Image (cartoon, rainbow, N blue to C red):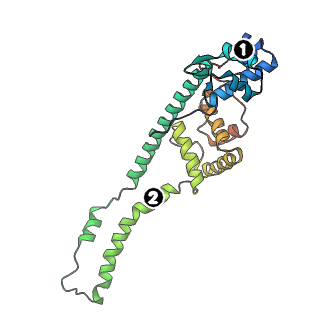
Amino acid sequence: MKKQIKPLAFQFYAKDWLTDIDVRALSYEEKGIYFELLCMSWIQPLPDDISKLAKILNIAEQSLSDILHFFFIEKDGYFFNEKLEKNRKEKTEYYKKMSEAGKKGNDKRWNNSKEKLKTKRSPSDNKAIAKQSPSNHSNTNTNTDTNTNYISKDIQIESEPLQNQIEVIKEYGNADINKMLGTIKTVLYLEDFKETKAMQRNFGKLLVELKNKLGKNEFGTRFMALAKDQFHLKNMGSLQYLYKQIKGYVPIQQDNSIKSFT
């Protein structure tokens, strides 16, 4: 069964939260209740059992009921916030498209690598392998050199694709760097980066260290936020630029095409 892609976080726009009339009319306690319910609803549907929810939140049932019936709708035994669910759908579709695009890019790179690894024998090599030893050679030490020559040629021909394979695997000299830069190329549809191979290795190492420092989720969140911004996207062919932007990341004002949940 194909694993379902679930967004880890929802969009939160401070400006929309602070300027929404309905939210502004709430007390600080009510705002806290509302935001807590949104977070709970993002993780799993809220059961339409107000008494149970009130105990979980440790608040009066009437206060909870007012917030739920104003900002949420009841459906199939649960409470839902319509804008939050719309945000969930949009993010799920977006991540699904990104995942499919990444898979296609990875398949293309893998197929190209397999083509490079195919054995290519010249006609002269084939003749050398197929050539029979002279009839006056018997199964004695006198034909050892001749047989060794044939065997050596065969091994040399068969070894060429293995050597090519090693060069592909060790493109950047480190498995973590290979994975990091290969993933970036796939997601951004890049043939190569602007830097030299030596500089790519250096910045690849820095990016791996930064990912380990920030954690996989935070690193991925920053990278995807930059990738979705057109200004940054056109400059992300440079690993130096990408590293500096992820390291000194400042949240980007998102496109209003994805609406706030408030």
The number of numbered badges drawn on the structure is 2
Q: Is residue 31 above or below residue 200?
A: above
Residue at disc 2, secondary structure:
helix
- Bin the neighbour count of mark 2 within 10 Å (Cα to Cα): few under 14, some 14-19, many 20 and up: some
Q: Amino acid at mark 1?
A: Asp
Q: Position of residue 237 (x, y in %)?
A: 58, 38
Identified at 74% across, 19% down, the residue is 61
Judging depth in this view, the residue of 71 and 154 nearest the camera is 71
Q: Which mark is residue 165?
A: 2
Of the 4 image quadrants, the one containing the C terminus is top right
- x 73%, y 32%: residue: 250
Real-space CA distance between mark 2 and mark 1, rounded to the nearest whole angstrom: 65 Å
Note whether residue 234 is visible: no
The residue that disc 1 covers is 66
Residue 136 location, x and y as percent? Answer: 19, 86
Q: Residue 35's spot in the image, x, y percent?
A: 72, 23
Name the residue nearer the viewer: 227 or 241: 227
Q: Residue furthest right?
A: 28
- In the rendered image, the vertical position of residue 4 relative to residue 182, given as above or below: above
Image point (57%, 55%), residue name: 175
Q: Nearer the viewer, residue 51 or 1?
A: 51
Where, by quadrant of the figure, is residue 159 drawn? bottom left
Q: Identify the amino acid type marked 2.
A: Gln
Along the horizontal axis of the image, is 139 left or right of 34? left
- Left or right: 4 as drawn, with respect to 32: left
